[in-house]
Image (cartoon, grey):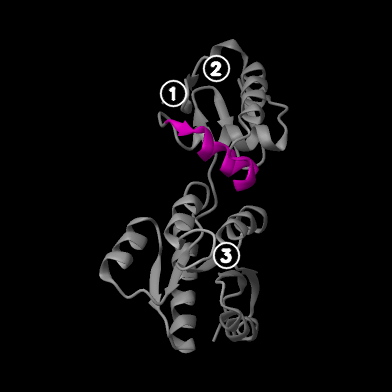
Amino acid sequence: MNIVSGRILVVDDEPQIHRFLSPALTAAGFEPLRAERGEVALRVVAANAPDLVLLDLGLPDMDGQEVLRRLREFSSVPVIILSARDREAEKITALDSGADDYVEKPFGLGELMARIRTSLRHKGQQEPPGPELVLENLVIGPQGAALNGEKLVLTKREHALLLLLARNPGRVLTHRQILTAIWGPAHTEDLAYLRVYIGQLRKKLGPEFSAKLKTEPGVGYRLED
């Protein structure tokens, strides 16, 4: 049997859960990552890009539902909820907020590992290699961009910012969404970073194309469809 490998972040404030899951995940070929608080979990996801998150709802600094909501602002990583809350409303809220699965505590290790493998298989099926994006005379690839056939000299973050906007044509992306996606959850209030990079990006795109990069005052930015 093929073992699906990857990094799995376990978000739970109960030490016994980590003592139970860490060796089991390691034995199954996964690299376990650990967080006991919601804010820490968001930073770990932003910095380490795990392949899957096991998320408890009862965290000491914020509710797991809030962690999930903020996580979905910048990441599509599969999330399996592990919780002692068995109310149907809790499950519906978590699934509607972007959770991939919901496992009640106490749970059997065999069932949990099967659910992990299923979520990772679905992730692989849903995420083919990213194609080039073509917006009129602008071509954006995974590693760079070209305008009118000429390569644009972009920094890594400028490219990431352009790619994020181009993947959401016509959609307003809030300051928080952009800052979280590009700089991580610790920088959601750093609007100065964003203004500087938007300005640099507009300058490099030139007057014709930069006019399509719209500012929504007090909200965020939008790239015209």
- Residue 10 position within the rendered picture, expressed as x and y whole percent measured from the top left: 57, 71
Nearer to us in this view, 201 or 104: 104
Q: Quadrant of residue 66?
A: bottom left
- At x 73%, y 33%, the residue is 155
Characterize the local packing of mark 3: few (<14), some (14-19) or many (20 or more) Cα atoms within 10 angstroms. many
Distance between the alpha carbons at the discs numbered 1 and 3: 32 Å
| Relative side of 126 to 23, left or right | left
Instruction: Identify the disc placed on residue 51.
Output: 3
Query: Taking 17 as reference, is 47 above or below it?
Result: above
State which quarter of the image contains the C terminus: top left
**Which residue type carries mark 3?**
Asp
Q: Nearer the viewer, residue 93 or 29?
A: 93
Q: Nearer the viewer, residue 145 or 160?
A: 160
Q: CA distance from mark 2 to mark 3?
A: 36 Å
Tag 2 residue: 209
Q: Amino acid at mark 2?
A: Phe
**What residue range appears in magenta?**
172-188
Q: Residues within 10 Å of mark 2 (few under 14, many from 20)?
A: some
How many numbered marks does the figure carry? 3
Secondary structure mostly seen in magenta is helix
Residues under numbered marks 1 and 3 in contact, where contact means CB atoms less than 8 Å apart: no
For label 1, count other residues whose C-alpha is less than 10 Å away and answer few (under 14), some (14-19) or many (20+): some
Q: Which residue is farthest left?
A: 88
- Is 185 included in the stretch rendered in magenta? yes
**Can you give x and y, in whole percent of width and height, for residue 98 in the image?**
39, 57
Q: Nearer the viewer, residue 196 or 160?
A: 196
Residue that carries the numbered disc 1 in the rendered image: 224
